[in-house]
Image: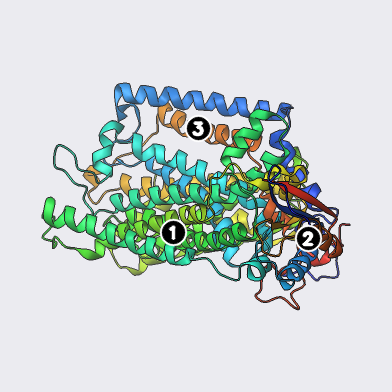
Amino acid sequence: MANNVHGSTSVLDVPVIGPEHNFETVTETVAQIPLSSRTPLGWVFGFLIGLALLGALTMSIGWLLLNGIGIWGNNIPVAWAFDIINFVWWIGIGHAGTLISAILLLFKQQWRMSISRFAEAMTIFAVACAALFPLFHTGRPWLAAYWLLPYPNTMGLWPQFRSPLIWDVFAVTTYATVSIVFWYVGLIPDMATMRDRAVSRVKQVTFGILCLGWRGSARHWHRYEVASLILAGLSTPLVLSVHTVVSFDFAVSVMPGWHATIFPPYFVAGAIYSGFAMVLTLAIPIRAAYNLESLITMKHIDNMGKIMLATGLMVGYGYTMEAFFAWYSGSFYERAMMYERMLGPYGWSYWLLIGINVGLVQALWFRRVRANLPLLFVISLLVNVGMWLERFVIIVTTLSRDFLPSSWGMYYPTRWDFMTYFGTIGLFLTLFFLFIRFVPMIAMFEVRTLLPQAKVDHGQAHGAAHGPTGDGPQSAPPAH
Amino acid sequence: MHVSEPTNPTYGVMAEFHSAQAIVDAVRRTMGEGFTKVEAYTPVPIEELNDIIHKKRTILPTLSLLGGLAGLATGFALQYWASVIEYPMNVGGRPYASWPAFVIPSYELTILFSALATAGGMIALNGLPQPYHPVFNTPRFSLASTDKFFLVIEADDPKYDGHGTSRFLQDIGAKGVYDVPA
């Protein structure tokens, strides 16, 4: 990102790391959060909210397993409802983490470094929440094994590999696995730091095991950096493929409103849009609660707001094209679907979604809005509501208005639908609160590379390495 | 000339530096002096150090490629076998070997296997997990993961000479020189 070279000064014109930092202060700021024996009261409060909602999830899943999916509002014609809406919503949220950790790494974006760790954690937890829905919407998840996974079973059955639903299984399990691997590899050097700074024997041994005995030798680092680059290179096409495959669940079918070639890019943009909204939702309170303003600066907030705006505009283009395709196709059913979507019984959800994802997001054009944290927080929450509504609109409006009016029907979610959905938010919150309490939430070793202490004069050295490419460190005076 | 005592074996000698530039300069002079069993330990990745000390690049990219190819072959073979040989099912008259449909799972397994080979390869080539290493015997070394940079010359080095090597390290600007017990 280019520096803002305007005459006016703004709170957004700051480097990606506070000028007062050096290796020790960065390490201490981040490492003391998990190492401290004091648990902040706010953490306890948030964790309890997460646990309470997690309890609701456990209850609703228990009731589901006892009674079957009849407890949900799904019906014929709306056979896909909350379960798929929530699945797509959660998977989409995960995408920002991979974008930050992989795609921005390939583009050498330095502002990525202090937000990548917790954005990736967000990815993993979001994918975990997403995975619950396809698993439990089968009603009998113990049977899902042979529906979903290719393994030699006693019935001699194999999955249908021509179905996008099985592609989804491969895409999502690969995404979950690679995200966890990438995240863990990123943690290894920081776990060594935690081992070396821990005082209690239990923590020393735990972090010692987790860091695998990392020493940070030149040989180690060389292989490590090559591995990170390759993993980023692999995660980039992976993350683009995941929501593409999710969109195939719809686009490969012949339902009006689903059978569109724009679905893959439109879904990927929507995923990144909602993911950045979630990163902001998490980053704004966390940086305030843990005094991380000098590591997650207004520059990060500004850049995330800009990415949200850019992807929001792409999503808006997607909505426009959907409407245009419906008209231009000349197909009676496509046009009827779009008419029903806008003016039918679920029209309120369509216009609410347009109001948020096309209307409200325009506020992010203004620097004053991107610099206003409470406002940005509210926008990020609303964007997640808007993206949930988008999936609701796509799924419910298409299914409730089938080809024949005789098979039309309305869909109403039950309390169990809502309990399961809010329950997964509880699972997400619980995992996230555990993460910020026990794991260094900022990649310390990466942030150190931004500091003057890490700079090497390349004049006489061969091979480029970690030269400054963006804003930030040049404007930071030497720390010592 | 100092002869190391057999009762008190030494892994080598460790010098401490306070910036990336300082350790790169020191490593360059150490290698220039003809030392060969040298290693640098740093709290941040410094690409130059590997180029100066080890000169070789890792074979990791090859492992990633092989992993990816293995994933591609596994994914395609699995689907072909299941859909054509083991459980052929006629759906709408489509050919059994409908390869375009097999592209996506094959693609995903390519990435999966390649990523696992990359991460596993990095860990294995680095000799991890390795809970014990002589460098951990030096108390100051715990700062190698925070803000200090260390250079170690091993006692196995043909040019190693106890006190002489320590003095050499002091001369090239070390902020501290420590013996590393084996």
Q: Is residue A229 left or right of residue A157?
A: right
Residue kind at label 1, given as amino acid type: Leu
Label 1 or label 3, whichever comes before in sequence order: 1
Looking at the image, is A139 positioned above or below residue A458? above
Residue A279 x %, y %: 61, 48
Q: Which mark is residue A249?
A: none
Looking at the image, is A182 positioned above or below residue A478? above
Q: Is residue A296 left or right of residue A270?
A: right
Kindly check if marks 2 and 3 are in contact, taking CB atoms under 8 A apart as contact: no
Quick one: A164 or A375, which is closer to the camera? A164
Residue bearing mark 1: A238
The crowding category of the residue bearing disc 1, from other C-alpha atoms within 10 Å (few below 14, some 14 to 19, many at least 20), is many
Mark 1 vs mark 3: give the one in front: 1
Badges 1 and 2, same chain: no
Would you say residue A451 is visible in this rendering? yes
Based on the displayed image, in which of its 4 quarters is residue A211 positioned?
A: top right
The crowding category of the residue bearing disc 2, from other C-alpha atoms within 10 Å (few below 14, some 14 to 19, many at least 20), is many
Residue bearing mark 2: B165
Residue bearing mark 3: A422
Mark 1 vs mark 2: give the one in front: 2
Quick one: B3 or A8, which is closer to the camera? B3
Figure label count = 3
Q: Is residue A345 left or right of residue A195?
A: left
In the image, what residue occupies the spot 86% across and 57% down?
Answer: A479
Kindly check if marks 1 and 3 are in contact, taking CB atoms under 8 A apart as contact: no
Q: From mark 2 to mark 3, how far is it between C-alphas? A: 65 Å
In the image, what residue occupies the spot 68% across and 30% down?
Answer: A43
- Quarter of the image with the C terminus of chain A is bottom right
- SS at badge 3: helix
